[in-house]
Image (cartoon, rainbow, N blue to C red):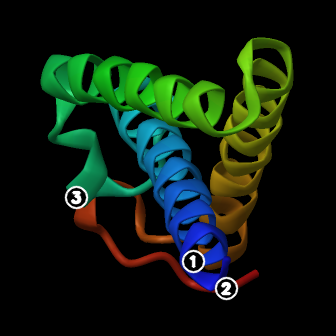
Amino acid sequence: MITVGLASLGFCSLAVLSAMFSALALYAASPHCRWPRLRRAGRLGQQIGLVAAVASLWLWMAELGVAAGLVAMLCTWMLAALLLPALAAWHRPAVDGSAREPR
C-alpha cells in the first residue's frame, strides 16, 4: 500500500518538474526572455520544451487519466509560464551585459 503511494508521488513530482522545465525551455526560446544565459538556447530550447511538455502530459495522463491529466499538466505548465517573466522582472538582470543604475 505504501509503495503505491510513493510511486504515485514520484510520478507526479516527475510530471511537475517536466512541465516546469518545459516552460523554462520555451521561455528561453522566446524573444521576451530577460536572462541572457537562457536566451542562448534559441531554437533548441523550443524543441526541448516541446519534448518536455509531451513527456509531462504523458506522465500526468498515466497517473490521473486523460482528462484530469490534461488539466493538471496545463495548470502546472501555465503556473510556471506565468511565474518565469515575473521572476525575471523581479530579478532585473542587466540588459545585454551592461550594468544599469537603479532609478
Position of 82 with respect to 13 (left or right) is: right
Q: Nearer the viewer, mark 3 or mark 1?
A: 1
| Dot 1: element | helix
- Mark 3 / mark 1, whichever is N-terminal: 1
x%, y% of residue 29?
A: 34, 27
Position of 2 with respect to 19 (left or right) is: right
x%, y% of residue 66?
A: 73, 14
Which residue appears at 15% of the width and 41% of the height? 40
What label sits on residue 102 in the rendered view?
2
Q: Residues within 10 Å of mark 3 (few under 14, many from 20)?
A: few
Which residue appears at 70% of the width and 32% of the height? 73
- Mark 1 / mark 2, whichever is N-terminal: 1
> Depth check: 28 or 61 in front?
61
Q: Residues within 10 Å of mark 2 (few under 14, many from 20)?
A: few
x%, y% of residue 100?
A: 49, 76
Which residue appears at 63% of the width and 54% of the height? 84
**Pointer 1: what residue?**
6
Q: Is residue 31 visible?
A: no
| Gap in angstroms between the C-alphas marked 3 and 1 | 36 Å
If the image is split into quadrants, where does the N terminus sit? bottom right
Instruction: Give the amino acid at mark 1.
Output: Leu
**Pointer 3: what residue?**
37
- Mark 2 / mark 3, whichever is N-terminal: 3
Which residue appears at 23% of the width and 17% of the height? 47
| Dot 3: element | helix
If the image is split into quadrants, where does the C terminus sit? bottom right
> Depth check: 91 or 72 in front?
72
Q: In the rendered image, which quarter is residue 96 located in?
A: bottom left
